[in-house]
Image (cartoon, helix red, strand yellow):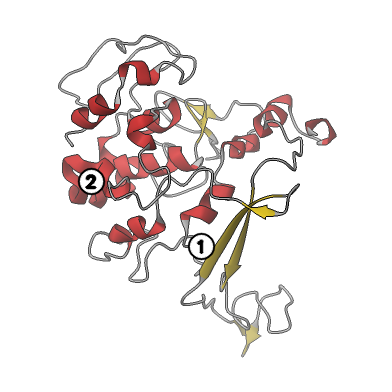
Amino acid sequence: MTAGLTAVSAFKQSGTGNLTYDPNLPHRIAILIGSGSVRGTSTNNSNGTNQPVISGGSAVAALNFNRGKTITYDFIPSTNKIKARQRDIVSVNTCNNCHKDVTATTTSGITTRGLIFHGAGGRNDVTQCVTCHTDQTKAQSTTGGDQVSSSYSFGATGNGFLLDGESVVDFPVMVHKFHMSSNLIKSGAGYYPASSSYPFPTKAAAFITKASSQLCYNCHTTNKTARNEDNWKTRPSKIACGACHDGLNFSSGLLTSVNRSNLMPTHGGGAQVDDSKCAGCHTTSNIISKHGL
């Protein structure tokens, strides 16, 4: 299907991956109730048109819905059957253990009502977040030339879509980096989601203080509130682990340890092309102990 795309580079086409429709695979539909501006404010006119709402000669300020709701369904189109979630890593209720604590930080996304992003009351559940924040967002790149590494300094345009070859706003990359915050090895101009003012190394520093050495268990709890909650310790991967341990170059095997006082020249397992060998060395018990849990 990528052959039908127009005015895009080969890199952008490859970034979208395989778009062939398969009705036998799980699909997700997200229904947002109470999302965006309330009718009659901002650009949401009471008659449904999308034009600035004017009152007394000035635009009416946006008023977002107070308590939105996200409903998601996973289903198989070929059978019309609802299916259990295929990947259920973290429950939003777990997220809200911190995201309801307004004393933690003034970082965007923390309110007394819990996790809310994009200024809309309905954007408040990770099951919907992951439908947009996927690896395919790297298809925004036209040539791959806006990939950044080492110094992480984007060009004059301020646009960047890839960090070490991974999509910068792919959910596991983005979320792990935000929460790893000041403990990340790399920093510098451009080390943030494209066209954003949210630098990874500093934006969520308050979370590090709250989490101390047990950062992983703040999100990946032991009470099995999510179907695949143990994945972080049973299925290590380049994308998830590498998002926090950003000093490791999987292609070369070169490593700068998270503990800056103990710099290591190489990754003990050497260069890795995929995740197939990760669990061989990084066993569940090893991962738990290395994270001080």
Looking at the picture, how far across and down is residue 177, in whole percent?
Answer: 37, 39
Viewer-nearest residue: 77 or 157: 77
Residue at x-position 26% and y-position 39%: 182
Q: Position of residue 82 (x, y in %)?
A: 63, 55
Compared to residue 252, the image places residue 66 above or below, namely below
Q: Amino acid at mark 1?
A: Arg
**Residue sitting at 45 percent across and 30 percent down?**
239
Instruction: Give x and y (percent) for residue 58.
Output: 60, 83
| Mark 2: few/some/many CA within 10 Å (<14, 14-19, 20+) | some
Q: Position of residue 244 (x, y in %)?
A: 34, 33
Q: Is any atom of residue 6 visible in this view?
A: no
Helix, strand or loop for disc 2: helix
Screen quadrant of the C terminus:
top left
State the residue position of label 2. Answer: 208
Would residue 8 appear left or right of 216 to someone viewing this image? right
Name the residue at 58% across, 48% down.
132
193 lies left or right of 79? left
In depth, the one of 37 and 61 nearer the eye is: 37
CB contact under 8 Å: marks 1 and 2: no
Residue 48 has which mark? Answer: none
Label 1 Cα neighbours within 10 Å, binned few <14 / some 14-19 / many ≥20: many
Q: Amino acid at mark 2?
A: Ile
- Find numbered disc 1 in the image and state the secondary structure of the residue it sits on: loop
Q: Residue at x 45, y 21 (%)?
A: 275
What residue is disc 1 on? 123
| 245 versus 176 height, above or below | above
- Mark 1 or mark 2: which comes first in sequence? 1
* Picture quadrant where residue 15 is located: top right
